[in-house]
Image: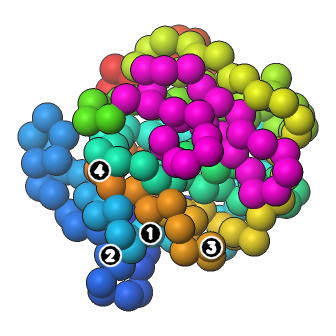
Amino acid sequence: WNDKSGNNRNVEQSVAISRPLYQATGFNSLPAIAFDGTNDFLKNNTYEPAGAFTCVLVYRATSNGTLLIVQRTTGILEILNFNSPGYEPLSFTATGSAGPKGLTPPGGTLNQNFILIVQYDGAGTAISDYNARINGINQAVTGTGAFGFSPESGFSLGARPVQNNFFTNGTISEVLFFQNVLTGSDNEKVEGY
């Protein structure tokens, strides 16, 4: 999946059986990438954003799994799980003893289209450093403790590839990264695009 920004932050899969499928009419007659929930994922081993960021993800999940992994240059990992065993319906998590940081529904509902905006202010590992919006509504980020560490690296879609688990069954039609925290009006512009 090629990066349209020109920064060459492409995600790819060299193993044919683990490649998600391109769907020409996946979302509202627009293209999407379909993950099978068994072994599909895409990965960029080198992109690790530094500082604050906003990630926009347009998705439809039909079962449990990991939608997105971003390995921070600081070693802090943000994982967005979808209904994975032992986690909130939609959650930031980290491998280790720190525990999940949950998002309130409706983002954990299966078989529905969502525009998810996740923001990190770059300040630290506390819950207050993270924000989320789902379909234009701000979400409460809950949980305890700080984020932990994981053997994952780079940027991944559809699974925890190093740990070979939490494969997503569903479609992702758009992933946007901004190297800052978008304002409320900027979020609305992105959601409307």
Spot occupied by residue 74 in the image (x, y as percentages of width and height) = 87, 57
Q: Which mark is residue 19?
A: 2
Q: Which residue is mark 4?
A: 171
The local crowd at label 3, few if under 14, some if 14 to 19, many if 20 or more residues have their Cα within 10 Å, is few
The local crowd at label 2, few if under 14, some if 14 to 19, many if 20 or more residues have their Cα within 10 Å, is some
Q: Quadrant of residue 122?
A: top right
Spot occupied by residue 103 in the image (x, y as percentages of width and height) = 60, 26
Distance, label 4 to label 3, CA atoms, is: 21 Å
Distance, label 2 to label 3, CA atoms, is: 17 Å
Q: Which mark is residue 163?
A: 3
Dot 2: what SS? loop
- Residue beneath the point at 27% across and 30% down: 112
Query: Residues at badges 4 and 3 in contact (C-beta under 8 Å)?
Result: no
Query: Residues at badges 2 and 3 in contact (C-beta under 8 Å)?
Result: no
88 in magenta: yes
Spot occupied by residue 167 in the image (x, y as percentages of width and height) = 44, 62
- What kind of residue is marked 4? Thr
Query: Residues at badges 1 and 4 in contact (C-beta under 8 Å)?
Result: no
Distance, label 1 to label 2, CA atoms, is: 7 Å
Looking at the image, tell me whether mark 4 or mark 3 is earlier in sequence order. Answer: 3
Q: Which residue is mark 1?
A: 42
Q: Quadrant of residue 13?
A: bottom left
Q: Where are the magenta residues, as a range?
A: 82-109
- Residue beneath the point at 37% across and 29% down: 109
- What kind of residue is marked 1? Leu
Spot occupied by residue 57 in the image (x, y as percentages of width and height) = 44, 40
Dot 4: what SS? strand
